[in-house]
Amino acid sequence: ATDYICITFDEAKLYSTITHDFLKDRIIALDLNPNYIGYSVIDWKDNDIHKVVTSGVIDIKQINDKEFSFKQQKLDSSHPKRIKINNQRKHEISEIANYLIKLAIHFRCEVFAIEDLSIKANDKGYGKKFNKLVNNNWNRNLLYNIIQKRCNIHKINFVAIKPDYSSFIGNLVYSDYPDMVAASIEINRRAYQFYHQYIVRDFPTSKNIIFPEFSWKIIRKPLEGFSNEDTRKYSSWIDLYKYVKKSKV
């Protein structure tokens, strides 16, 4: 008996039938982690002037918590409940990817930016639950591949952006937003620079993409738990990050 029906198609042929009127320098960007996906749609005027059109957080923690509870019950990976929750997670990830593409099309985004995540399965140092989330439950490649395919079909410029320090910088510079959204705005800023430096090539390529210009004026939220005397002696994002990380605050 036949258990599955598989449908394949040539993206190039479908690509030629779809047209969209995109808005120049409107970018959608994602911040990814196993439990939450933060997104932001932004209009860019330059590196410092922008308007957040919309933003939000997609919560998939409930599915991961349910999977972890099954593991605590010592249910084998072949148990029907474990299989069902894994299939449910894959289905939800697929639906999330399609929702985000529809969002990009609705807001006429010229660029879709996603974190360039290549994470090896190993001990992250934050406990077994965290390791399982990152190493086994994330399905980040599924999300990445669906979004990239849909971007190809709809002629949206797809870019993968290095995520280094994006959460740290985002939560200092864009502190009015939830953590995941703030990080997505920083990814969005980098995508704007990357797109113009390496794809459109109308910006000089000498400018640093990972780090914005360091200035205490753009850090709108005080570093809670730190004195100004301690923090203001640092003049780079890396030095400040190292100080905060070692402080154990």
Image (spheres, rainbow, N blue to C red):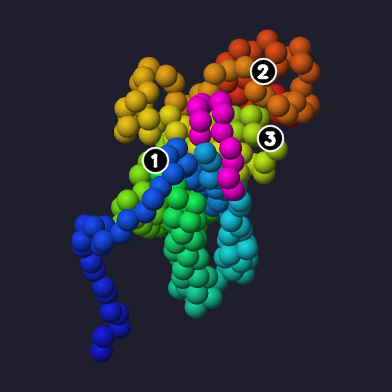
The disc, 1 or 3, on the residue closer to the chain's N-terminal end is 1
Report the Cα–Cα distance between label 1 and label 3: 24 Å
The span picked out in magenta is: 44-54
Image quadrant holding the C terminus, namely top right
Report the Cα–Cα distance between label 3 and label 2: 14 Å
Horizontal relation, residue 1 to residue 72: left or right: left
Count of numbered labels shown in the rendering: 3
Horizontal relation, residue 164 to residue 196: left or right: right
Image quadrant holding the N terminus, namely bottom left
Q: Position of residue 201 (x, y in %)?
A: 32, 27
Q: Amino acid at mark 2?
A: Trp
Considering only vertical position in the picture, is 74 above or below 143? below
The disc, 3 or 2, on the residue closer to the chain's N-terminal end is 3
Report the Cα–Cα distance between label 2 and label 1: 28 Å
Q: Position of residue 151 (x, y in %)?
A: 36, 52
Tell me the residue at 64%/13% (across/down): 234
Look at mark 1 in the image and give the residue it sits on: 160
Look at mark 3 in the image and give the residue it sits on: 175
Q: Amino acid at mark 1?
A: Ala
Give the image quarter of residue 195: top left
Look at mark 2 in the image and give the residue it sits on: 216
Mark 2 element type:
helix
Residue 105 in view, yes or no: yes
